[in-house]
Image (cartoon, rainbow, N blue to C red):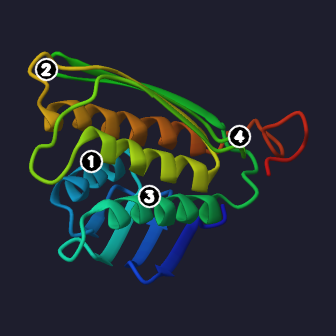
């Protein structure tokens, strides 16, 4: 099977980001975005999705805030997955996973459809340190639109409303669901769409 890997570099006046991805990896990571909780969540995402992932990001997190870096990491990661998937031949296309953590449960559903769409159903959480659930949603939206997937997240939040407790099962479930969707099905010949193409 052809290696499904990609290296994407993106430099703007606000951020300088490099992502190296191997979809068919073992979950090895080396991630430094400058946003501690995002690093941790992406490590969980890659570990459970069995993606080898390296991310190096520099941004204006000290001069301004984390907004640009958080969103741009989502953009570049989505672009890396899109490039690594190529024409998407023989992939399963759909994936879903449900992951609990204490009394929180995250349900994530993915369709590698060629149409970027993101929807989440959850409660909002206040800032904990520099991060918030709103920031996480900005990341997911950027990632989904650049990869051109349909991404639905339904979170039944923990009663303690702790940000970490609620975000962790979401990122784990996303890794599991995307791994499922991007797996090659040997029975599938060609593109998994009746149109014969996934743009």
Secondary structure under the numbered disc 1 in the rendered image: helix
**Disc 3 + disc 1, Cβ < 8 Å:** no
Q: Is residue 109 left or right of residue 160?
A: right
Task: Give the labeled residue for mark 4.
Answer: 113
* N-term mark: 2 or 3: 3
Residue 60, picture quadrant: bottom left
Q: Quadrant of the N terminus?
A: bottom right
Q: Is residue 110 left or right of residue 35?
A: right
Q: 104 above or below 74?
A: above
Task: Give the labeled residue for mark 1.
Answer: 44
Q: Is residue 129 left or right of residue 90?
A: left
Task: Give the labeled residue for mark 2.
Answer: 102
* N-term mark: 3 or 1: 1
Residue plotted at (38% across, 77% down)? 15
Residue 74 is marked as: 3
* N-term mark: 1 or 2: 1
Q: Nearer the viewer, residue 160 or 45?
A: 160
How many numbered marks appear? 4
Residue plotted at (27% across, 32% down)? 169
Q: Is residue 75 left or right of residue 46?
A: right
Residue mark closest to the camera, 1 vs 4: 4
Residue 57, picture quadrant: bottom left
Q: Where is residue 87? Give x, y as percent.
A: 76, 57
């Amino acid at each position: 099977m052809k290696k499904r890997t990609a290296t994407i570099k993106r430099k703007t006046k606000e951020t300088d980001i490099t992502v190296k991805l191997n979809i068919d990896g073992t979950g090895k990571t080396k991630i430094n975005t400058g946003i501690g909780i995002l690093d941790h969540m992406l490590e969980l995402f890659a570990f459970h999705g069995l993606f080898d992932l390296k991310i190096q990001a520099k941004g204006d997190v000290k001069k301004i805030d984390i907004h640009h870096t958080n969103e741009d990491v989502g953009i570049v990661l989505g672009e890396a997955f899109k490039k690594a998937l190529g024409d998407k031949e023989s992939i399963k296309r759909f994936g879903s996973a449900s992951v609990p953590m204490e009394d929180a449960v995250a349900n994530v559903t993915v369709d590698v459809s060629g149409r970027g769409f993101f929807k989440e159903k959850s409660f909002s959480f206040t800032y904990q340190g520099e991060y918030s659930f709103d920031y996480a949603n900005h990341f997911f939206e950027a990632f989904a639109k650049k990869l051109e997937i349909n991404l639905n997240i339904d979170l039944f939040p923990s009663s303690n409303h702790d940000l970490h407790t609620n975000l962790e099962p979401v990122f784990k479930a996303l890794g599991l669901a995307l791994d499922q969707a991007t797996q090659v099905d040997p029975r599938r010949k060609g593109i998994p769409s009746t149109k014969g193409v996934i743009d």
